[in-house]
Image (cartoon, grey):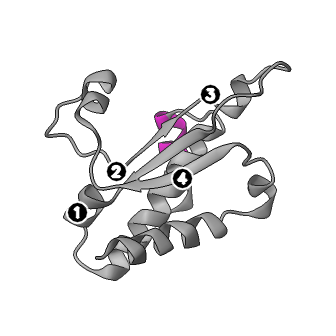
Amino acid sequence: MDRNKFEKLVEEALSEIRQEFQKYLKNITVIVEDNPPLDVYERLGISRKGLLLGLYHGVPLKNRGPYYGNLPPDVISIYQKPIEKICHSDKEIKEKVREVVRHEIGHYFGKSDRELKEIENEKY
């Protein structure tokens, strides 16, 4: 999938986030990268053969105190190539992008991977 089409899927996934959550999304940037940088694997302590679809970099909202401010934006990276690698159609890519964007937004709000997995399992 070309980058522009993929980025539009990310934008669409962001626009689908419920308004009650969107109003808290401040000072955050979402970017699309081909693959995670090698240092990310080292920092997270995972194998370079591991599959990383997205990553939240920043201070979770629940951990921000009254003096939090004047900082560069938090960043959510969405990794295009790994997502494409596990999907077999444009429809699957769209669904996976939505899932990954929501997952990383969950980290922005301070949810752990375990908590997010529980929430995702409740939906199905």
Q: CA distance from mark 2 to mark 1?
A: 10 Å
Span shown in magenta: 113-119
Mark 1 touches mark 4? (CB < 8 Å):
no
Residue 113 x/y as whole percent: 47, 36
Q: Residues within 10 Å of mark 3 (few under 14, many from 20)?
A: some
Query: Can you say whether 96 is above or below 60 in the image?
Result: below
User: CA–CA distance between discs 2 and 4?
Assistant: 13 Å
> Residue placed farthest to the left in the image?
49
Q: Amino acid at mark 3?
A: Val
Q: Nearer the viewer, mark 4 or mark 3?
A: 4
Say if mark 2 contacts mark 1, CB within 8 Å: yes
Name the residue tied to disc 2. 53
Q: Residues within 10 Å of mark 1 (few under 14, many from 20)?
A: few
Please name the amino acid that badge 4 sits on: Val
Residue at which label 4 appears? 30
SS assignment at label 3: loop
Tell me the kind of residue under disc 1. Ile
> Can you tell which quarter of the image residue 86 is in?
bottom left
Compare marks 1 and 3 and give the one earlier in the sequence.
3
- Place residue 3 in its image quadrant: bottom left
The residue that label 3 is drawn on is: 59
- The residue that appears at 50% across and 66% down in the rendered structure is 10
Q: Are there few (<14), some (14-19), or many (20+) residues within 10 Å of tag 4?
A: many
User: Disc 1 versus disc 4: distance between alpha carbons?
Assistant: 21 Å
Q: How many marks?
A: 4
Mark closest to the chain's N terminus, 2 or 4 = 4
Between the C-alphas of marks 3 and 2, the distance is 20 Å
Disc with the residue nearer the chain's start (3 vs 2): 2
Q: Main secondary structure of the magenta part?
A: helix
